[in-house]
Amino acid sequence: MFKTLFKPFLKRFIGLFFSMAFVSMLSVGLLVAFTSSMTNLSTTYRDYKNKYGACDALITTNVGLRSSIEGLGVVEGVEAYDTRLTMDCFLKKSDDRTITARLFSYDKEMDHVFKRYVLKSGEVAPDKINVSIVRKYAENNGFNVGDTLRIGYASFYIPIHISEIIETPEAMFVRATDYIWSDSRDFGYIYLDQVEIDKVLARVVKEYTDNPEFKEIYEKLQETLGIELPDIEKLIEVGNRYSSFVFNQILVKSVRKYDQNKLMDNLKTFLNGKVEIKSAQKANEQLYQVYMSNAVKQLRVAATFLPAFFYLVTMVVIGLFLNQIITSMTKEIGIMMSVGIAGKEIRKLFFAFTLLMTFVASILGMGVAVGLNIYLTSIFRAAYSIPTIPFTLNPWVCVLSALSLIIVGQLSCLWSTAKIFKITPKDAMLNNESKRKKLPKWLDKFIDKAPMNIKLSTNSIAQNPRRFAVSTFSIFAAFTMIMVTGFFHTSKDELIGQTLNRRWCYDAQVYLTEVDQTNLIDELKKQPSVKEVEEGYFTYLKVTSGGNDFYLETLGVDSSDGPLVYIPDSKGKKEMAIPDKGIILSKNDAERLKVKVGETIKINDKDIEVKGVSEQYFHMIQYMSRKQMQELGIQYATTFLVNVENETEFLSFLSEKDAKCLTVFTASLKKDVNTVFRSVDVFVIILIAFALGMSFVILNIMSQNALMEQQRPISVMRAIGFRIINISNIWTIESFLQLLLSSLFAIPTSVGLSKILFFLASSKAQVYPFIFDWKVVVFGMLFVLAVIVASHMISMVTIRRWNLADNTRSRE
Amino acid sequence: MEEKRVVIEAKNLNKVYGEGEATTYALKDVSIKVYEHEFLVILGGSGSGKSTLLNMIGGMDKVDSGEILVNGNDIVKFNDRELTMYRRKEVGFVYQFFNLLNDITVFQNVTLTPGSDKKRALKLLREVGLLDKKDKFPRQLSGGQQQRVAIARALNKDSDILLCDEPTGALDDASGKAVLKLLEGIHNQGKTIVLVTHTKEIAQMADRIITMKNAKVVSDVINKNVIKAEEVEW
């Protein structure tokens, strides 16, 4: 019996089969692509980190001898450690433009602690100083293997030869801080083997002996300082001997699962008295790890919720389609039951149909997943500097996704086919036109008095309220998805707008590295290359609240009325003025400190009142007046914000002052932020396309279903002279009701869902604000309306093709 | 007169549709008996309850109250599985509008019942004169031909009871007569036939005529002037 009936059954509903398969294919494809690319990213990052020297503790010290920290290897919690020398310098590009670089030494034999990932290698010239340059740095500046560049300070430069292009985890997210350079915009890392460091020193010796200017500088220095400096040759000789043994950074790999705080305490205790610790960072405090963990967290939220939502919708869609098939087959089902075919035998047809459909969808879905995965992975590669994120689909993810789809399909089938058992053969074989449901008396009276269109429309709904509910649900689901993605887009724009456009409304921020640079600031103000300058006091203030200490980035400026300082208010919208006394905290930090406006916190052992809270989404910073800063002991301006007229002249001026300042251009910061956000836009487009595609398919099916139910009455109306436009008015009223009802539920649902998702995606360093934008609602409504109109038009085409004689005849 | 075995006995059947002001009695306290090998006609106008009664006996619809004993078993108490087996094995049903499955062939329709015999199906198709059409689809046949296929399907089981609901209702005179002739032949082979009709002329073929009106049995008489199918004129 099964074999006899299944083939014609499949043939008859082949259109619906492929519609269901299409929707299911998208769900599987999205789930597999999202999950695979997310898994690939986080797994690759983790492996990359473990293998290529991402350390668990990074300690920056003064320059010391390696022998002074002998015994570090046996400190509890330390599995292995290495030391290295790091320093910042200038790099002259071929066009003589000076950019900045950070040099690191490394020891090939310690590659279990630090190892380079070599992307490209060239000739190692024994007579040259060979360096490895990080890929992003090389790409941004057009460097390649075999190029010769010059590194140095002031007028003293030595040539270097690029022998490798590499990646290192710490180079994934580079931020220029702490050290001296003029232009952090094109800043990157250069690595030198210990052997090459020796060559550098040898070169310095040569320059010294060959370059009388160098000797003069050194002798003048001795004169100025009024002390006897070591003989430079002796110094170089000593340095040469000990170059392999000096360091100013320690990299530590910890014992697996060892407590990171305890490790830090142990290291600090050991190093106390041996070296001066300038900074000590655990794994989760190192910039690139913070950056990546935030990114992975946000992607994980997207990869978890969105596919789950798609699967839920797919389950509903499959159920709807099956319902429609059952409705159209009601009579056949009745016949089958009347000849003694059991309900569960009939059900097998549907289970088999759904099983085949989900199987086909799974196969096709893998194709979608491959394409989407490639695209997502390319986005990730551009956004995060991990050398090889594979394009692979995780086989377990594929299998589990396919299995989940099959299970979802079978569950839908179970739910939809339950009604087979509820109908008697006699009822099933009766007229296919559904019986009109009983309505409340007041509604019946209203319908009686209503114009013909409303009467027919309401009757159509009353005849099959389930169909109406299902269509409304599909519009609701599409509308919700479009609005959630729209709200996310608005949030992202607001974040960018507030941070990139309003707060970062200056071209550069210059950080002064020595105290009292009043002369420099005065000089700068006179520079024709500078349009506007705003002085500020910038520091990390130690804040005590609730018995805990926090270090908060704080800027002290004269007034927020100045053009270069913009402080958002507590809603993130308007500008806030800086009070003479007190502090304005970022909202995020206020929540961390658990303080409100009007309360006090301790800063440098002084009680300071919280005068305001500023809603900032990114790069959170506190504000106070210069006067307040001075009262806290910060006496000199330590930063200034600049709008630049001529960048080359500005940089040229600063190059001479490199010993005293660091410049950060907001353009490069904005570029980095935009790159990451561009990848978010991909998700937005995919989701909207999916929402619209699915709702169109569902609405179309439901419309066709409605037409089938109403085939005879519609044909009779046409036979007596109704035009198609008159008939379509019936559905216009129904569609209007559907749009109204779905909006009533979709708007609050999308608001709630958005708030939850944004909360989950936000972190300490970055907040996604929820902003209700009516444009999103209107935009969503228009899109959904377009889908409704399209399905309407298809219905009208169907009606036009009907044979009125056949449809108005008796049933057989 | 030889005592005939009662194969079907319906006792005090009631069936109501709707509620409140819209209540409609489809059957009101109806009791009938069907004897083995007889040709029984249930005659009545539209809304008399005759089709409802037949659907109850055929296990196609549920009774509100009463008993229906078929070969001693009360089918009203049957669960879904038992009712399915009852429809599969105990009774064959022929409908006014044939109710063939349009997506499968004639032969497949006749062998649709689970456990049905393929050889017997071919034999039945030959008997109804449609063996040459066994690979056609129902939509390729005339109304009369479709009804004959439906009869073959109803007979392709081990049951001796055939229930017919207005089998000629959707047919022209010639086709209708052909169907009646077929039914006559089946009856002559020993089958028990219960036929529902609103046509008095067709009722004259029966051994016994039960008349229904307004959901009640109004008469139950033996037909003393049984006529042959070819003599039926309506």
Image (cartoon, helix red, strand yellow):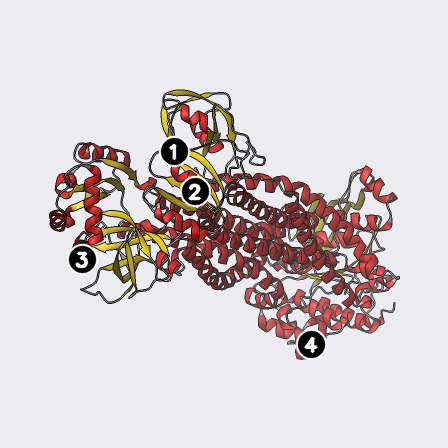
Judged from the image, the secondary structure of the residue bearing numbered disc 2 is helix
Percent x, y of residue A289: 35, 45
Q: Chain of mark 1?
A: A
For mark 2, what is the residue?
Answer: A524
Asked if the residues shown at circle 2 and circle 1 are in contact, with their CB atoms under 8 angstroms apart, the answer is no
For mark 4, what is the residue?
Answer: B130
Q: A762 or A709: nearer the eye?
A: A762
For mark 1, what is the residue?
Answer: A539
| Amino acid identity at mark 1 | Thr
Q: Chain of mark 4?
A: B
Mark 2 and mark 4: Cα distance apart in space: 107 Å
Judge whether residue A485 can be spotted in this image.
yes
Q: Are marks 2 and 4 on the same chain?
A: no
Q: Are marks 3 and 4 on the same chain?
A: no
Q: Residues within 10 Å of mark 4 (few under 14, many from 20)?
A: many
Judged from the image, the secondary structure of the residue bearing numbered disc 3 is helix
Q: Are marks 4 and 1 on the same chain?
A: no
| Amino acid identity at mark 3 | Asp
Please tell me which residue is depicted at 35% across the width and 48% down the height of the picture.
A656
Mark 3 and mark 4: Cα distance apart in space: 116 Å
Percent x, y of residue B34: 73, 55
Please state the total of marks drawn on the protein image: 4
Percent x, y of residue A436: 77, 48
Q: Residues within 10 Å of mark 2 (few under 14, many from 20)?
A: some
| Amino acid identity at mark 4 | Leu
Mark 2 and mark 1: Cα distance apart in space: 21 Å
For mark 3, what is the residue?
Answer: A210
* In the displayed structure image, the side of residue A356 where residue A218 appears, left or right: left
Judged from the image, the secondary structure of the residue bearing numbered disc 1 is strand
Q: Residues within 10 Å of mark 3 (few under 14, many from 20)?
A: few
